[in-house]
Each structure stands twice: as C-alpha cells, then as structure tokens.
Amino acid sequence: MISLTPYKKDLRLAGGGHAHVAVIKKWGMRPVPGVRVTLISTDTLTPYSGMLPGLIAGHYTLEDCHIDLRKLCQWAGVQFIPSEVERIDPLAKKIFCRQYPPLRYDLLSINIGSQPAFSSIQGATMHGHPIKPVRQFLQNWRQWLEAAQTSNGSKRIVVIGGGAAGIEILLAMHYKLRNTTAIHAAFTLVCADQSILSSHNERVQAFFKHHLQTLGIAIINGKHVISINERQLTLNDHSTLDYDFSAWAIHAGAQSWPAESGLQCDDQGFIQVDQYLRSISHPDIFAVGDSAAFMPAALPKAGVYAVRQGPVLARNIIAQLENRSLQPFKPQQRFLSLLTTGGRHAVASRGPLFASGKWVWLWKNYIDRAFMARFNPQPMVHKNNPDDGTAPMRCGGCGAKVGSNVLQNVLAQLAIQPHADIVSGPGDDAAIINLPSNTQWLQSVDFFRSFIEDPYLLGRIAAIHSLGDIHAMGGTPHSALVTAVVPYSNEPIMQETLLHLMQGVLKTLHDENTALIGGHSGEGPEMAIGLTVNGILAAGKALTKSGLMPGDHLILTKPIGSGVLLAANMAARCQGSWLDQALTYMLQSNRAAATILRSFAAQSCTDITGFGLLGHLQEMLIASQASASISLDAIPVMQGAQHCSSQGIQSTLFSANQHASQYRLDTKQHPSYALLFDPQTAGGLLAGIPARHTDECLRALTEAGYTAARIGTVKPYDSHALITLTGQPAGT
C-alpha cells in the first residue's frame, strides 16, 4: 500500500468474528487518515453461524458460509496477521500473540467469541467435540464420517445441548447420514433444561419435540453430563450413554486471557462493556459478541447480537479515533429466529409468532446469502488514505534514513547471534570477516517491494528467497546485510514496523546459522526490504547452471504459482486459503533440498525466482548447451494458481518472461501453460540428476517435506527446439 500520509495510530482487531468483519467492511469504504488497522485471527476463513447447519447437511459448500478474511482485509487495506492473542498488557498497550512479535496498539477491539464451558466436566476437553471452534468441529466430524463409512454396525451419536445450536446441528447430522451416506445411526439429545429450546415460544418447542420424535431421536431432558471417556457419557443421575460421536453445544465459556490480562470481567470471565461497547475498566478497548458482557442488560450468547453490534462498533471506533461522541448500542427486545430442520425446511418465530415450511427455508437462505454477499466485495485497488494536510515533507537522500533513536531501539531488541569469524558487525561502518582457507566466497543480492502487509512474514520470506541463491550454488550461507524501508509513520509505529521486519529476517537467518552483519534503513511510501547474502563454498565445488548432461532428469522441489497468486491477492481476487498455502511454500527453506540433491550427484542447479520456471530452465540449457523435454502434467502447481491464471490474472513480469522464452509447444490450452512464465517468490530448486537416482532422490525430498516432482528430461542440444513442452490439453 503506497501513501505519503504517515501512520499515527494503530487500531488492532483481535478475532475475526461477525462484528469485526462489519468493521473491516466499513473501514474499506471510509478509512481514517493516518490510522493503520490490523486484524489478528487464527483462521483465514471465519464461519457465518447461521449457515453452518446447512453446511453439515450438505446444502452449502464451505465457501458459501465462510467469509474470506484475507480477501476482505486486502480489499479494505487492513493488515492480516494469522496468529492467536495469548494476553495483553493494557498498561503498556501491547498485544502478545502466539509465535509472533508483540504488537502495540492505540485502540483495541476484541471479538474472539466463546468456547464451551468444559471445565466442570471430567474428560470433556480430551474426548468431546465442541461445535466451537467451528473449523475444528468440522474437521472432527468429517474424519469421523470417513471412518464410519468403512466400519460395520450401527453408530451412536449424542448431542449435548438442547438450545438452537444443538438442535440444528443434530438435525443437520441426521439429514446428512440419512440422505447421503449408508451409515445407520441412532441419535440422542441430552438437554439440561426440562424442555428443549427453552428461550423460544411454546409452539417452536412443540414443533421440534414432535419433529425429533418423528425421526426416532431420543430426548433426555433435565439431565446434564458430568463426565466422558472414549466410549461413554455419564449423566448427573449416574446413568450412562454409549456413543461413537458426541457433539457439544452447551452454554458458552469465556477465554481466560482477558481476565488474566487485567480487564474487568464478569464472574464467567466475559469482558464487561458499557453501552458504547467499551471496556468498563479500559476505555481504549472495545469488546463485542460472545466475548463481551453487556452491562446495561445481560444479553444471550447469540450471533444475532454480534451481527447487530457490528455497525455500532464500526461507528464508535471511528468516532473515538476522531474524538467525536459515541453512539450507544440498543439491543432489540425481540428478534427474528430462523431454525432449520435438517432438510430444506425451517421454522420462523418472533415473540409469540410462529411459521414453518419450505418457504421459510427459502426466506432464510435469501437472508443468509445476502449477508454473505456484503462481505465478498467486488475486487478493487484499494485507495489509501489521502493526506490530511498535517504530514511533514518527506526527505530524500540520507534525510530519508530512519532516525537514530528508532534504529538504536530496534537493534537493542534484536537477538543478533555472534559468529567467531566475524570481527565486527552491526554498528561499525563496515563488517570485517575472516575467511576460511580453501574456500570460495559467494554473494547475491535481492530486493522486494512489499507483497504482503505483515512485516514479520515479509522479513522471513525475503530472507528465505535471498538465501535460495546460495543454496542453489551448493554453498553454505554465512552472513547477510539488510536494506529495510518502512512506511512513513510516527516514531512508535515506525519502530514497531522495523522491529517486526527485522525479527522476521533474523528468524530465518538464525534458522540457517547465518549472521546479520549490517545494513541500512530508511523511510518511504511503502514497505520494502533487500538482502545482500554471503556464502562459502569449498573451492571448485559449485553447482552451476552449466552442468546439465543429456539423460539427466529434471527435478523441481516446490510447486509454482506464487506470482499469479500474489497478483490476485493485490487485486483482492485470491481466496485466503490459496494464499495461506502459497505462503507456506514460500516459508520453506531450500537448505535441506540442496543437500539432498547434491547427495544424489546433482551437477547443475538453480532456484526458480523472477524469470519463472521456463526462464530459469532456459538459462541452464543455454549454459549447458543442451535441450530438454518438459511434461506440463508433471509440474506441481499451487492451489488456485490455475484458476487465477485462467481469469487473465498475471504478474507484471509475465509478458517479458514469455517473450524471452524459446520453446516448442506440442499441446494446446494446458491449464499450467501460463504458469511457466510466472515469476516466483522464494521458489523451489530446479536440478538435473542422473536418471538412476531419480526415484530415491524424490523419496528423500518427500520425506523432508518437499512437494517435489520429476518434470522432464535433458536432451542433446537441438537448435530448433531448446525446450519441448508436452501434456494433455485442458478438458481431456
């Protein structure tokens, strides 16, 4: 994101619940100048609770009922951090996340939901399947379904909880088994209240009681579970229930960290908030949804309140940032309830009113899909905040360097490891290095504009990408210098951004036993980072591009497609799960792959980066005076890359790469064809190894965690066909 407006404040959103997606949508339409917004969420996809029973029953796909947080954040200009909040320090205004550097905040909003109150139930944490978190429940349910399909005998499914969530989940599972599988199962519902759906009117209760009985589902009222083991539930009257799968939809429990962090909470651990949705104890913190206890009047833990709190929260966050008066949240006394019955049939109620039928399901389906469509905005290039007229002139030259206070504070917080052969490093004008005898010195440089808003992740990937050149040459990384550019901002924000960027770099360097020996930092309109990396190599042992021999098999260690996926992400057209997988590949070092390839007699190797697979292969072939046959069917491809490519999405280097390539195409319209010219970030290694070692080499690479494949064969040089491409065309 490019802007000359300095960031002055940090707004952090903890949790990707219903209210926060409304805040992000609002922010995308009306950002506040000078404010950086960050969403912290463990999941890229956040479920819409109203459609989950339909997903379990088979009426919806996963994409139908999940909001893609990465995609929404990209559209709105919001930074996305895939992590989990573990605690906060309200005095220092810091957030501590799992496997991520601490984050400062000026304003914090918490929308982390709830979890089943398991603490009093022996064995529940180990053996129960709570419906929240949804992602884990869906995974458990699908795994059980797969196993049940291959085993004999009738199954026993118990659902604990007689509220709306428990009833709908039970009926959805029942519908799924009866209509789409051969699994026979007996269902039991355990309800602690004397009647099911106790918060609904009598007609709703009577309808569902009769419906459950008609389906042969047993109902146990007025009892609750006190313990569970691998096969059996024990109730409070000491009776037992055998089960094969148990789903838990009991009353909500709070996460522990808000109370442990010093926020004022109720007796159950939920954050107490005032009428404006602000923490009673800390007015710079908002809390909404199930994570909050609304102090003017207690509210049920129902998704409808989180949805309705969203617009009020968005207005109040912006108002507080702009020092304007806040708007109170006024919960409605009655709300429309729409409950599904498993199939395409539903029940509607509001107060004493009641209706049921297929038309109610169609009505609910329309409402749910309309809600989801609000958070799947049309792709656009997000326009950053205009200058508010208060930003100082930004200098060039050495005047653009990061201030000494910021730099020294960052360096003081970095755990820079000493190396015996480095005489001097960061702090001096230049590094002094003692070189081992009988070695050659390798050196390479890379520079990146920011392709992801997360500075820590950017630093890690940039370092992995840069070290790839050393690995590809068969060398051992030794040291690195860093050039870092951070966006214009005030001193605290600039310091944190630079710190996170450098901590990401150091994480990779430490993993690779590589020393940080210096660098340069500056400010600019967007985040950027470059590394000059050094390596050592035994004299005469380099893997060069000129070592390919006819008959060698070409081995690729990572899938391709990162360029088109990053381009799609910039246009808010990339699914979050696709980007998650791509980032996982980018975070995979080539170190172990290089060692394995060398152990199987590789004589030629390169890393696949900006020129794309075909461009880098062409360099190897020209240097080796050889040709090659490549199977498009054999090339591993990142999820979503073919789809994005088919939509005409291309990285900026695509055309230049395609124009520079020399090849003969023996197949038409192959779905991977365009990806041959796709520039890769932190791509895999491409190497030629003797054919006799191929199977064993691929096995070793797979065991080391690489998605490796043999993609072709080296041929004698043919001036008419440097590269021949084969493969089955699309649709065959």
Image (cartoon, helix red, strand yellow):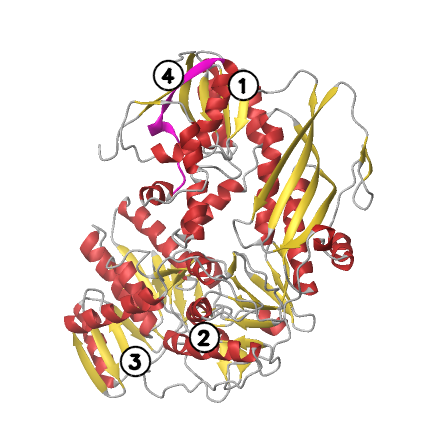
Label 4: few (<14), some or many (≥20) within 10 Å? Answer: some
Estimate the x, y position of residue 375 in percent, counting from the top left: 37, 65
Task: Decide: few, some or many residues near mark 1? Use Cα within 10 Å; few <14, some 14-19, many ≥20.
Answer: some
User: Toward which corner of the image does residue 354 lie, by quadrant?
Assistant: bottom left
Q: Nearer the viewer, mark 1 or mark 4?
A: 4
Q: Position of residue 575 (x, y in %)?
A: 39, 52
Q: Are marks 1 and 2 in contact (CB under 8 Å)?
A: no
Residue 708 shows up from this direction: no
From the viewer's perspective, is 560 left or right of 730?
right
Q: Magenta stretch containing residue 637, yes or no? A: yes
Residue type pointed to by label 3: Ser
Amino acid marked by disc 2:
Gly
**N-terminal-most mark, 4 or 2:** 2
Q: Which residue is mark 2?
A: 289
Disc on the earlier residue, 1 or 4: 1
Residue receiving disc 1: 600
N-term mark: 2 or 3: 3
Q: Which mark is residue 721?
A: 4
Query: What's the magenta region?
Result: 625-639
Q: Is disc 3 surrounded by few (<14), some (14 to 19) or many (20+) residues within 10 Å? A: some
Check contact, mark 2 vs mark 3: CB within 8 A. Answer: no
Question: In the rendering, at what x and y percent does residue 418 appear?
Answer: 79, 40
Q: Which mark's residue is nearer the viewer, 4 or 2? A: 4
**Mark 3 — residue?**
195
Q: Position of residue 42 (x, y in %)?
A: 50, 58
**Element marked by disc 1:** loop
Q: Residues within 10 Å of mark 2 (few under 14, many from 20)?
A: many
